[in-house]
Image: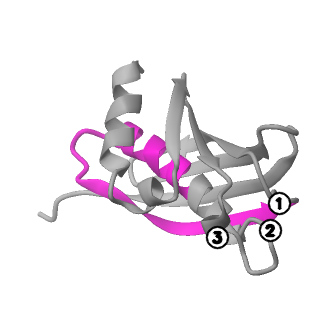
Amino acid sequence: MSIDIVEAFNKAAEGTLPGMLGMRMFKVEGDAFHLEMPVRPELMAPNGYLHAGSLVTLADTACGYGCRARVPKEATGFTTIELKSNHLGTARDGTVECVATPVHLGRNTHVWDAVVRHRETGKTLVMFRCTQMVLYPRP
């Protein structure tokens, strides 16, 4: 995929939750979709650590972008039907990066895995998996 898809996805995120959270796709490499998000005070939980929901949203967005780019041409879209996350750590500063890759790209469902890491330390923060239902026009 070209740089055009990166620019198109980042433009589409403007004014939506991913854009408001500061998420940005920075690379597509084969089937891997790479997003980043700066750690900001607005993304923290009251305990001073990065809110788990911020990390889940980053992972779900990365998987969603991958699914959106890979759905069959006759599909009208997709929706998340299941997600799971294992949180191994958190961050208080810097940037978090996410890489989403497909596990299954079927006609009716896609399964995606994502790993979120802290850029500055390389520490794995979240392991994430989601299932997407591919949507088609009704007959």
Task: Give the percent coordinates (x, y) of residue 87.
Answer: 81, 63
Three-letter residue code for mark 3: Gly
- Quadrant for the C terminus, please: bottom left
**In the figure, 29 relative to 53: above or below?**
above
Q: Position of residue 93 (x, y in %)?
A: 77, 52
- Closer to the camera, 108 or 118? 118
SS label for mark 2: loop
Residue extending farthest to the bottom is 46
- Kindly state the secondary structure of the residue where label 1 is placed: loop
* Residue at the image position 40 percent from the left and 38 percent from the top: 70
Placement of the N terminus among the 4 image quadrants: top left
Q: Residue furthest front?
A: 41
Q: Residues within 10 Å of mark 3 (few under 14, many from 20)?
A: few
The reply to whether dot 2 and dot 1 touch (C-beta < 8 Å) is yes
Q: Which residue position holds label 2? A: 49
- Check disc 1 and report the residue beneath it: 90
Mark 3 falls on what kind of element? helix
Residue 83 in the magenta stretch? The answer is: yes
Residue kind at label 2, given as amino acid type: Tyr
What is the spatial separation of the Cα atoms under label 2 and label 1, in whole angstroms? Answer: 7 Å
Query: As drawn, is 119 to the left or to the right of 63?
Result: right
Discs 3, 1 touching: Cβ within 8 Å: no
| As drawn, 31 above or below 9 | above
**What's the magenta region?**
60-88
How far apart are the two marked residues, 3 and 2, measured between alpha carbons? 11 Å
Instruction: Name the residue tied to disc 3.
Output: 53
Q: Residues within 10 Å of mark 2 (few under 14, many from 20)?
A: some
Q: CA distance from mark 3 to mark 1?
A: 11 Å
Q: Position of residue 31 (x, y in %)?
A: 54, 29
The question of residue 112 being in magenta is answered with: no
